[in-house]
Image: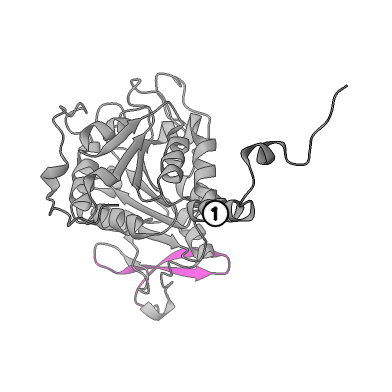
Amino acid sequence: MSDVALPEYKAKDFATDQDVRWCPGCGDYAVLTAMKKMCATLGVDKKDIVFVSGIGCAARFPYYMDTYGAHTIHGRAPAFATGVKLANPELTVFLVSGDGDLLSIGGNHTIHALRRNIDINIILLNNKIYGLTKGQYSPTSEVGKVTKSTPYGSLDAPLNPIALAIASGCTFIARTIDVDVKNMTVLLERGYQHKGTSFIEVYQDCNVFNHQTWFYATQKDTKLDTTIMLEHGKPMIFGAESDKGLRRVGDNVEVVSLGDGVTEDDLLVHDELNLEQAFLLSQMFSPAFPEAMGVLYVNTDKPTYNEMMHEQVQEVISRNKGKTLQALVTGSNTWTVE
């Protein structure tokens, strides 16, 4: 990276001359706003930032950020992002794409990017639908979802992105919602600061083909009862009157009302380092439970793939110092054919 003093950026400095071609009212606009705000605070030169995407509405992101970018092929964005980071570890790499791209055709690539712990930032925009191709059901669509490709209702159980990230060994896992730009900006920066793979699921509204799918988590009269904002070291309290909480019962979690002998001391305290607790939080869905927002899990002990790879390369170079290219190619496995 450059040693020259970096310019002071504002969010508008990351806007491009491209017309934003998302539908009016799309939740992607809020994500773009949060991303510009966050990038302006990083102290990183724009030429050292790369946005990578696959195919889908969300995948137009690289066109709208005044940085380097790559609009790649369907489902393969994690492979491209991995290659960019390995080729130049000094770059800051963001991968932005949708639930269809990253969890269907790209599910395998997403899993392996997460397990390797390469130092990239994955932002999954989850609208539970295929928006670009006009409204087919996606891997996160609910059972019974009636769409153009499931006219009698989907039979598939939806894939759980947070649980997938936990099972894959991801070291930074968070969730937010498109209308909460303030919290999203904070999470994006925390993901950037994390050394390793950060995975942030964004509940995003497709107001044309799947409008109101997240309304329970966004509307003023329901969101405080259907979501819970996690704070490390704080008891898990939620509700419009802050009168509900989560309590551990054996291997499960239950919703309780404060009062009548139940106090804050009885509630779960959020611990970002607790993997078991993160998994329990990943299994909570409205209306039975509030859905967890914020940072669910962080692991700072696992080395990054890019660091290990470059260390290995340097070790091999050192060990083979003085050898010719021919010797490296042939090694000891040679044959003489007569």
Query: Where in the figure is residue 59, as x and y percent of width and height?
Result: 33, 31
Q: Nearer the viewer, residue 72 or 210?
A: 72
Query: Where in the figure is residue 183, as x and y percent of width and height?
Result: 25, 56
Residue 300's place in the image compared with 109, above or below, is: below
Magenta-colored span: 241-261
Question: Is 323 situated left or right of 179 in this image?
Answer: right
Q: Nearer the viewer, residue 124 or 288?
A: 124
> Dot 1: what SS?
helix
Q: How many labels does the image show?
A: 1
Question: Is 208 situated left or right of 292 in this image?
Answer: left
The residue to which callout 1 is attached is: 314
Residue 290's place in the image compared with 126, above or below, is: below
Residue 209's place in the image compared with 316, above or below, is: above
Q: Is residue 28 magenta?
A: no
Which quarter of the image is occupied by the C terminus? Answer: top right
Identity, as a three-letter code, of the amino acid under mark 1? Gln
Rendered residue at 44%/52% (across/down): 197
Query: Where in the figure is residue 224, as x and y percent of width and height?
Result: 27, 58
Rendered residue at 47%/57% (across/down): 171
Which residue extends farthest right?
338
Q: Is residue 250 magenta?
A: yes
Judge the density around disc 1: few (<14), some (14-19), many (≥20) Cα neighbours within 10 Å: few
State the scheme by which the image is colored: one colour
Rendered residue at 30%/29% (across/down): 57
Q: Which of 309 and 319 is in front in this view?
A: 319
Can residue 180 be seen in this snapshot?
Answer: no
Can residue 175 be seen in this snapshot?
Answer: yes
Q: Nearer the viewer, residue 133 or 215?
A: 133
Rendered residue at 20%/38% (across/down): 66
